[in-house]
């Protein structure tokens, strides 16, 4: 049973990302959106946690939310795949269920 | 002029995900009409409010970052950004919007509004205020 996990809170303000990373199984997908996109950037205090999760889980980030916040796509952690809204729909469709870590 | 008070608006949240950043700007602009000694502090996720290059072309939210450019025209020209908060987020001063004001006491010379300060300096600045608003 594959799960798409979504995280929409900043990792510096809420523990949503941490709870997601510690409660998701290998093989699941994690989509960072809204203020969650800050976790996708290089050089932050949570970069190591995200990279460690990527060993077994596929991490995505919502491009329009990256652009809105003035974050540059070339500073997204290598291996994180950027998707648009259509890609978000595809992820929802290709997984059995969605767990939204609000 | 002892009735002038020192007001500090403390911005601690990222823009867009919540309405705090925009609401803070609204209150700052309203407060600017009252000729008080106003400063803005950016700590924690608040530093993301000043990130350069915000672009709402692909999103359905309004990019309100140009409003920060107008603060100088309202004599709001003390924007303190915490160094440690930048460091924790992999950011430097160069990642932020360049914000300036014209100094009427110095032949209208254009000067930077943003000052990067340490966490300890930020604590001292807060200690010197008469009124503090958190957003």
Image (cartoon, coloured by chain):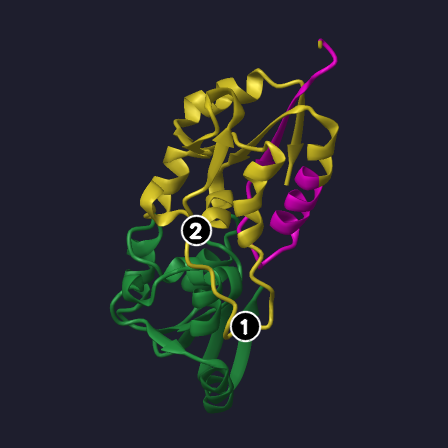
Q: Which mark is residue A60?
A: none
Q: Position of residue A11 (x, y in %)?
A: 46, 53
Residue under pointer 2:
B51
Residue B112, placed above or below residue A11 = above
**Label drawn at residue B59:** 1
The spot of residue B116 in percent (x, y) is 39, 32
Front position in the image: A20 or B106: B106
Residue A88 at x, y = what percent? 48, 82
Residue A83: in magenta span? no
Which quadrant would residue B115 be assigned to in this image? top left
Viewer can see residue B11: no
Residue for point 40% across, 77% down: A29
Q: Chain B: what color?
A: yellow
Read off the magenta span.
Answer: B2-29
Residue lying at the far top in this picture: please name it: B2
When the figure is inspected, residue B6 is found, relative to residue A41, above or below; the finding is above
Q: Is residue B125 visible to the viewer in this orientation of the structure?
A: yes
Mark toward the start of the polypeptide (1 vs 2) = 2
Q: Residue at x 50, y 52 (%)?
A: A15
- Residue B3 in the magenta stretch? The answer is yes
Q: Is residue B34 above or below residue B71?
A: above
SS type, badge 2: loop
Q: Chain of mark 1?
A: B
Mark 1 neighbour density, 10 Å: few (under 14) some (14–19) many (20 or more): some
Q: Is the residue marked by circle 2 packed among few (<14), some (14-19), or many (20+) residues within 10 Å?
A: many
> What is the display colour for chain A?
green
Which residue occupies the extreme front position in the image? B107
Distance between the Cα atoms at labels 1 and 2? 17 Å
């Amino acid at each position: 049973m594959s799960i798409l996990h979504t995280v929409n809170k900043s990792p510096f303000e809420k523990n949503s990302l941490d709870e997601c990373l510690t409660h998701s199984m290998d093989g699941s997908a994690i989509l960072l959106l809204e203020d969650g996109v800050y976790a996708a950037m290089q050089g932050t205090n949570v970069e190591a946690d995200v990279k460690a999760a990527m060993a077994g889980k596929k991490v995505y980030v919502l491009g329009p939310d990256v652009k809105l916040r003035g974050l540059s796509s070339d500073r997204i952690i290598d291996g994180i795949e950027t998707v648009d809204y259509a890609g978000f729909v595809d992820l929802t469709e290709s997984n059995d269920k969605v767990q939204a870590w609000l | 002029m002892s009735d002038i008070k020192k007001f500090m608006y403390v911005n601690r949240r990222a823009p867009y995900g919540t309405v705090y950043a925009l609401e803070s700007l609204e209150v700052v602009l309203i407060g600017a009409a009252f000729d008080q000694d106003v400063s803005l502090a950016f700590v924690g996720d608040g530093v993301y409010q000043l990130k350069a290059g915000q672009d709402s072309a692909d999103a359905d939210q309004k990019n309100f970052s140009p409003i920060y450019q107008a603060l100088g025209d309202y004599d709001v020209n003390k924007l303190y950004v915490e160094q440690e908060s930048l460091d924790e987020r992999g950011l430097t001063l160069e990642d932020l919007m360049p914000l300036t004001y014209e100094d009427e006491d110095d032949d209208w010379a254009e000067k930077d509004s943003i000052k990067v300060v340490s966490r300890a300096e930020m604590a001292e600045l807060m200690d010197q205020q008469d009124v503090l608003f958190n957003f």
